[in-house]
Image (cartoon, helix red, strand yellow):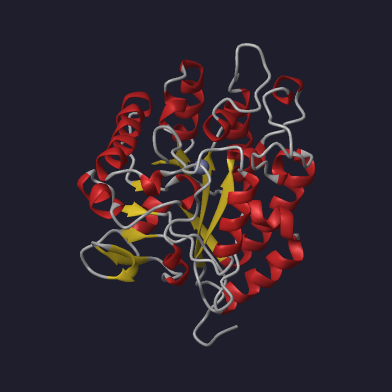
Amino acid sequence: MPAGYAMTDKLRAAITSDVDTLASIYKGEGCRRAGGYTYLEFRVGLENFSEFLRPYGARATLFMVGNDFKIEKNHASIRDVAADGHEIANHTTSHAQGFRHLSPEEKKQEIMDMDELCRAVAGVKPIGFRSPGWNISDDAIPVLQEAGYHYDSSVFPTSLSPALKLMHWYTSRSRGSMERSTLGQSEYVFAPIVPYRTRSDSFLRRGNDGILEFPVTVTPLLRIPFFATFLLSSGFGVFKQSYLALKNAGRPVQFQFHLSDFVDYGHPELLDQVPEDGKGYYVPKALRMPLAERLAIFRRVMDTLAEDYCFSTLSEWVGEVRV
Ligand SMILES: [Zn+2]
């Protein structure tokens, strides 16, 4: 335990989730169901996530997609998660995977349309943003500032970024080039790995006139990703090693889930909405692993985190970041 670290001084952990439906990610590709998507996963995934967090007293930041607010049967679920105290943040209107390559005007449209839908349906204005696929670029900073956003959480400064970019390019080979792009500008590999204020023209540099950035957590030095969907592939051992490296360095963490982590895609209603493997779409492991198995792993994660960390949403964290 590092000097000056008392048992009562818990570090901060934010639990976040990208609420990506099959409709958002695959946009119809691989959906064989007559009549299209049913959004069962939206309701079930949010209910399961909220129930999962309850014993820990943890409220999460949910990055949500505007198009899901246009579906009337989703409204009750959206209001329920807001009533449970979870923060709703902006994940664009159409889950624009190629967000980084959009013009500033198009970026603004993607942000503001979701913003309006969220205010109309949930009665709250989002103050945080995450680009789909963590795929952001420097020209988004003034757009977010003008739109009244207090923070961004799209920078993913992992050393595995070049490999992950290649893997995404290959596994999404049936898609257009915008959809095959991921993880933002290449130099973000070297961005700060703790919350920081950016320069107004660069996510790579600290400054005093940019936006507050909560980068996706990576380990000190090696910059190994530290989030749920990665954990399902790497196993609990890698998680524990990363966890100890973060805890011993006194680092706060942002632990990121996806909607799919909490949905049983073996459900008869969902089976014919899930794309098949090997057809040129990226299909995460969570879609194939039994839900009970995933929940058991995630409970070990939360039990471990709860020992040393206290949980808050990113909006609660905003006022307390020292930059
Ligand atoms: Zn997403």
Q: How many marks?
A: 0
Percent of width and height locating residue 102: 34, 43
Percent of width and height locating residue 121: 37, 24
Comparing 271 with 118, the one in front is 271
Residue shown at 34% from the left, 27% from the top = 117
Image quadrant where residue 226 sits: bottom right
Comparing 295 with 103, the one in front is 103
Comparing 277 with 48, the one in front is 277
Residue shown at 23% from the left, 62% from the top = 200
Q: Which quadrant is the C terminus positioned in?
A: bottom left
Percent of width and height locating residue 236: 75, 61
Q: Which quadrant is the N terminus positioned in?
A: bottom right
Instruction: Answer yes or no: is residue 323 visible.
Output: no
Vertical arrangement, residue 289 with respect to residue 42, above or below = below
Vertical arrangement, residue 94 with respect to residue 299, above or below = above
Vertical arrangement, residue 97 with respect to residue 159, above or below = above
Residue shown at 33% from the left, 29% from the top = 123
Comparing 257 with 271, the one in front is 271
Residue lying at the far top of the rendered structure: 35
Instruction: Answer yes or no: is residue 185 visible.
Output: yes
Left or right of 246 in this view: 239: right
Percent of width and height locating residue 186: 45, 64
Image quadrant where residue 116 sits: top left
Residue shown at 52% from the left, 88% from the top = 3
Vertical arrangement, residue 248 with respect to residue 45, above or below = below
Left or right of 105 in this view: 216: right
